[in-house]
Amino acid sequence: MKKILIANRGEIALRVMRTAKEMGIKTVAVFSEADRKALHVRYADEAVCIGPPPSNQSYLLGDKIISVALETGADAIHPGYGFLSENANFARKVKEAGLIFIGPSAESMEVMGSKIGAKQAVSKFNVPLVPGTQEALRDVAEAKKIANSIGYPVLVKASAGGGGKGMRVVNAESEFEESIRMAQSEALASFGDDSVFIEKFVGSPKHIEIQVLGDQHGNVVYLFERECSIQRRHQKLIEEAPSSCLTPAVRKLMGEAAVNVAKASNYYGAGTVEFLVDHELNFYFLEMNTRLQVEHPVTEQIVGLDLVKEQIRIARGETLGYTQDELKIHGHAIELRVCAEDPMNNFLPDIGKLVSYKTPQGYGVRVDDSFEEGMEIPIQYDPMIAKLITFGATRQEAIDRMKRAISDYRISGIETTLSFGTFAMNHEAYVKGDFDTKFIEKYFSPDLLKKTNTELNEAAAFSAGNIFFQYEGKETKTIENTSSNWQLRRK
Ligand code: MV4
């Protein structure tokens, strides 16, 4: 493999290119007209414009991207996450064009792309499933019997759904038929597939996922878990590895279950097996994501592997080269998604220009981003500006470092989720590790951020005052800011 095309944009395109460069592999960027000045375009060895800003006229044009790969002499395509990354047809076409798809086989993607298909595939492989049906509902009366035997509330899910789309809670038998019909018509409208199934509703679950790696020779290992419970509208905001709630025994059971999920679809490449975990640490397989995930860096930090490098090695046909026993957890890592969203205003997207933009530095801090000061956040795409990752010997050290890194981050011009990060890192439930997917709903309100913002404003005012006095050359005096950690001296 001498040259790869990265069929993506933003931080993940850069992330993939950095590893390619380290491996002596040339890179080809593709970009939309909105991304002419983007960093991934400048970083690549070559870059080709593939169309107008809307994704369906650029980053989702699989055939066009394949022809660019052929024209530029690339040997392989890395899809990143989102866009074409879980599109089995794209993976198949890449292969048919004589190129390597850096990811799993189209067949694995197809099995896992259907929730019902995935449940059926893993059911013979000793993987715990939420009690429910493993076939698309045909007969409502039959389904009602099953729901009654499971006990209410039950959840109706669309087989083709994802990210919480096409889910519906049914609280009582009287609502059952109506809910099924609505779920089916919603699923048909959203996914063109009206298959739905039912599961026992697990209240207030934790979302814990296991990173797996498989090679093309049948070896599969797990790289432990990521705790991803802190999310809003099915959008993760904070992830960490390892989870603070698992015991070594449960960790091993979940890891082995995840390996079995991978084996059920002859999986190779990097993949993530999602589980729901209840407060007694019972865990249930939910679905498998057949791509590199946004939050993969926390796993990299605790296991010491570059996951993109592993993906590329696997795609070249190499063996993993390590066994499960050789993999160990070292320390603790936390990731905060720094998004152009306003936590004070329902996390609504906040667009605009990065008037000032300075990233935190120093030991144990990693920033995966793709912006520079003065750039606009394009409205057409994901509002994520950066991933701020901190790591430490212990969870508390990673938390303290995250607080420091957030306070060192300078972003002005747009509202971001940094303030939410400070809120979470200081919250007793977070610090204790006593939280689940209801963390934000249960504990967060914009009022609780106001104090933080006041502190930031005071800090900015003190800073401005300091600069002013320096220029004036006035006498020295220590100004103590009591409500924030800023202490300024003027000479
Ligand atoms: C569930 C559930 C409770 N019981 N399944 C949401 C997204 C999709 N991947 C699965 N989801 C859920 N499935 C049963 N049987 C609760 C959720 C859920 C959730 C899961 C993970 C992370 C956040 C969540 C937020 C709300 C609901």
Image (cartoon, rainbow, N blue to C red):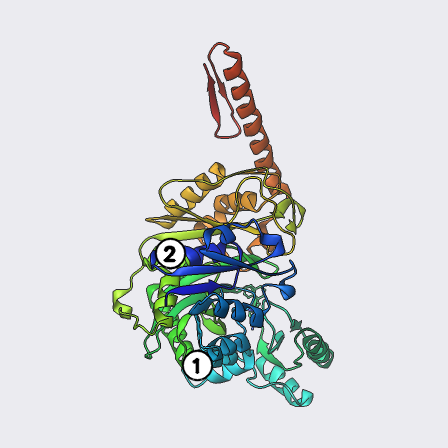
Q: Nearer the viewer, residue 440 or 315?
A: 315
Q: Going from the N terminus, do you reach mark 1 or mark 2 first?
A: 2
Circle 1: element type? loop
> Where in the figure is residue 5, as x and y percent of width and height?
47, 64
> Where in the figure is residue 323, as x and y percent of width and height?
27, 70
Mark number displayed over residue 265: 1
From the viewer's perspective, is 387 left or right of 235?
left
Q: Amino acid at mark 1?
A: Ser
Q: Amino acid at mark 2?
A: Lys
Residue drawn at the location 43% of the way across and 79% of the way down:
127
Q: Is residue 245 visible?
A: no
Q: Nearer the viewer, residue 94 or 180?
A: 94
Quadrant in which the C terminus is drawn: top left
Mark number displayed over residue 21: 2
Q: With respect to residue 27, does 378 lie above or below? A: above
Number of labels in the image equals: 2
Q: Which quadrant of the figure shows ligand 1?
A: bottom right
Q: With respect to residue 310, does 156 lie above or below? A: below
> Where in the figure is residue 13, as x and y percent of width and height?
48, 57
Alpha-carbon span between mark 1 and mark 2:
32 Å
Q: Nearer the viewer, residue 374 or 327?
A: 374
Label 2 within 8 A of ligand 1 by Cβ: no
From the viewer's perspective, is 392 left or right of 290?
left
Mark number displayed over residue 302: none
From the viewer's perspective, is 189 left or right of 70?
right
Q: Nearer the viewer, mark 1 or mark 2?
A: 2
Q: With respect to residue 245, does 260 lie above or below? A: below
